[in-house]
Amino acid sequence: MQTDQRRTIGILTGGGDCPGLNAVIRAATKSAIHLGYQVLGFRKGFEGLADPVSTMPLTLENTFDILDRGGTILGSTNKGRFSAKIGKDDRRAIDPELLACVKRNLEELQIDGLICIGGDGSLSIAQQLFETGVPVVAVPKTIDNDLSCTAFTFGFDSAVACAANALDRLHTTAASHERIMVLEVMGRHTGWIALHAGLAGGGDVILIPEIPWSYENVCAKVIQRQQMGKLFTLVVVAEGAQLPSGEQVTLETVAKDRQTRLGGIGQTIASELQERLKTETRCVVLGHLQRGGTPTYFDRGLSTQFGAHAIRLIEERRFGEMVRYAPPDISSVPISHAIKQLSLVDPSGSAVQAARAMNVSFGDQSQFCNPFPASQVTAKTFVEQYDVTDLSELALDCDL
Ligand code: F6P
């Protein structure tokens, strides 16, 4: 039982870690303390809420130097009693007794508001706690950027920076050896990281779950580049992209309380391209490097705004809401809206159009085509409009 008369805010970080978690913890703690709250962190995600309750006080002292620190000082887990999400479209109900036990524990600790920082799995647990009567607010976290109702989740920009940096590095070695380099990036069932890293790092081929592709089209792109004197090609593939056969490449099928681990598609594609094109091909799997390390400045800023806004939601007693970035503002939406469906890359959205305008291949067509299908812009007017002088840069087979 708590004796301190100050109001108390609880904070937890659920699911896989990502850069910016500590920045949210710091921002929420600082703003809460300024308003006269005390702050209690729950350890190891939702696990710290029950049997046994595991907490640590969050103070100005122990959060003052964590703005740029990766990971989470509270710890986290993406498996166990509280895993509410197993597969792509699965949502599991948490044991009602466990939810009731959490509610009792939080009442005993006199928690006035609980901030749950997490991705779609963690926020679907947060929603269930809210429906049980726990005063919850949520902050959207994930490198995958797959939560709806927010332009960006924090962590995404850092993962993109990591993957784009890898492409920069692969560029020089690929060019030196005239190789095809395949970079496999994370993203779960979405292609956000692959698309944005591909744009920022100059990928030539981007393969994502949202756009079906074929080996023939990827090979055509490599050959097109070779005919233009570019004897190397950078392919970025999202771990969740499906092979042309429709198969998803997985590392292992794991226990009931865990999502299937995606991974391995990069090597499958590399082997096939080498075989078909007789060109040396290497695969690099970026893996958890995308999740570790210091957050980018954009993510630190976004995390800080998210953390501060979460306290505002608690002050205004707007429980059951998730903070979100709706540029240029930070606002909020019901958690239930954000977890209704995954946010997928729009195959006809502006980022894909821009990539196509750069003659990036998504493996779905073999030659340059008008990237702006909704408009009346022809390839010719496109060239004039954007002052592209070297037509061979655009395409060999293009009907200009
Ligand atoms: O959701 C974040 C993420 O990093 C995914 O991109 C990836 O598929 C998964 O988590 C890896 O999870 P784990 O921590 O279990 O390896």
Image (tube, rainbow, N blue to C red):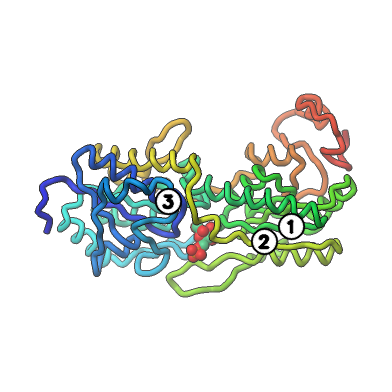
- Residue 103, quarter of the rendered image: bottom left
Mark 2 and mark 3 lie on one chain; the one further toward the N terminus is 3
The quadrant in which the C terminus is found is top right
Query: Which residue is more in the foreground, 385 or 198?
Result: 198
Where is residue 138 drawn, in percent x and y? 35, 48
The numbered disc on residue 181 is 1
Secondary structure beneath dot 3 equals loop
Instruction: Estimate the spatial distance between the alpha carbons at disc 2 and disc 3, rounded to whole Å.
Output: 26 Å
**Foreground of the two, 224 or 26:** 26
In percent of width and height, residue 30 lies at 28, 42
Looking at numbered disc 1 in the image, what kind of residue is underneath it? Met
Q: Is residue 104 depicted above or below 115 in this figure? A: below
The residue wearing badge 3 is 69
Q: Which residue is mark 2?
A: 284
Mark 3 and mark 1: Cα distance apart in space: 31 Å
SS at mark 2 in the image: strand
Using residue 399 as the reference point, say whether residue 72 is left or right of it.
Answer: left
Pick whichever of labels 1 and 2 is earlier in the sequence: 1
